[in-house]
Amino acid sequence: MANIILIRHGQSKWNLQNKFTGWKDIDLSENGINEAKEAGQLIKQNNIKFNIAFTSVLKRAINTMNIVLKENSLTDIQVIQTYRLNERHYGGLTGLNKKETAEIHGEEQVHKWRRSYKTKPPKSSEEFMLSIKKDNKYTELDQIPYSESLEDTVKRVSPFIKTTLINALKKNENILIAAHGNSIRAFLKITEKISDTEISKLEIPTGKPLLVKYNLHNYKFSSHEYLK
């Protein structure tokens, strides 16, 4: 049995401001730093040691990862960054205040953009897309999406699980993953076979470690549970 700890990054500065963040590279707030430290301490109390760690290419997840590892005196393990664990790309909603956007477009439309499995947000501006294309973090991508639905995020996360993660789990390695609300929802949808309807109801709080076990005998993932 191998252990996987999934953690959504601590509160970011744009979480604090109630903004859509997506692929915008926003750092942790002061509260987010504290959330990451508390998560690290909780993992330490549960005596879970990691062999390898994965995170997105966005600094709010990277810094959460670094803080958690530091709290566990594991700063020398291998950490792999991949865009496949990035937050969902919120396209033209990026940077907008969620409440103000709902006042303009209506609660129903914004809820559909946020929670519908297949609906994509409006496309990104060309200016924002150009900034991503120039970013060295995305040089491996032949094509960058203008926005993503949760379905798109699931398709992006799936190869990470089926190749990179499974290969590490076969070595009976304990794995730490610091990612984002929607990439974790995508992870759980795939591993727990959650329906399109039910996944829209799943909330992932910041800074709360989730434990998922992988059975090496029947190759199945357990349902997630929060560490206590």
Image: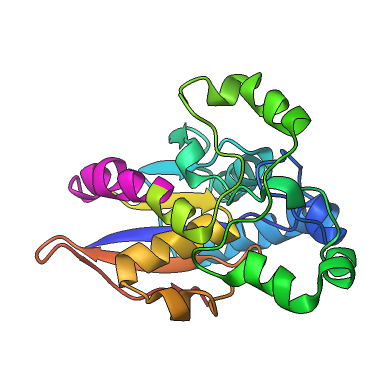
Is residue 30 placed above or below 83 in the rendered structure? below
Question: How far across and how far down the image is residue 110, in percent?
Answer: 73, 69
Question: How far across and how far down the image is residue 48, in percent?
Answer: 41, 59
Can residue 149 be seen here? The reply is: yes
Question: Residue at (83%, 70%) from the top-left corner?
Answer: 102
Would residue 123 be counted in the magenta stretch?
no
Q: Quadrant of residue 62?
A: top right
Which colour scheme appears in the figure? rainbow
List the single residue furthest toward the left: 217
Q: Quadrant of residue 211?
A: bottom left
Question: Residue at (65%, 55%) from the top-left corner?
Answer: 121
Question: Residue at (88%, 58%) from the top-left corner?
Answer: 17
- Observer-nearest of 142 and 190: 142
Q: Is residue 139 left or right of residue 159?
A: right
Question: How far across and how far down the image is residue 51, in percent?
Answer: 35, 43
Q: Is residue 12 left or right of residue 75?
A: right
Can residue 44 be seen here? The reply is: no
- Observer-nearest of 93 and 207: 93
Would residue 170 be counted in the magenta stretch?
yes
The quadrant of the image that shows the N terminus is bottom left
- Observer-nearest of 103 and 18: 103
Count every numbered label the image shows and give the total: 0
Is residue 14 placed above or below 51 in the rendered structure? below
Question: Residue at (43%, 43%) from the top-left corner?
Answer: 53
Segment colored magenta: 156-172
Question: How far across and how far down the image is residue 65, in percent?
Answer: 58, 45
Q: Main secondary structure of the magenta part?
A: helix
Q: Is residue 5 left or right of residue 218?
A: right
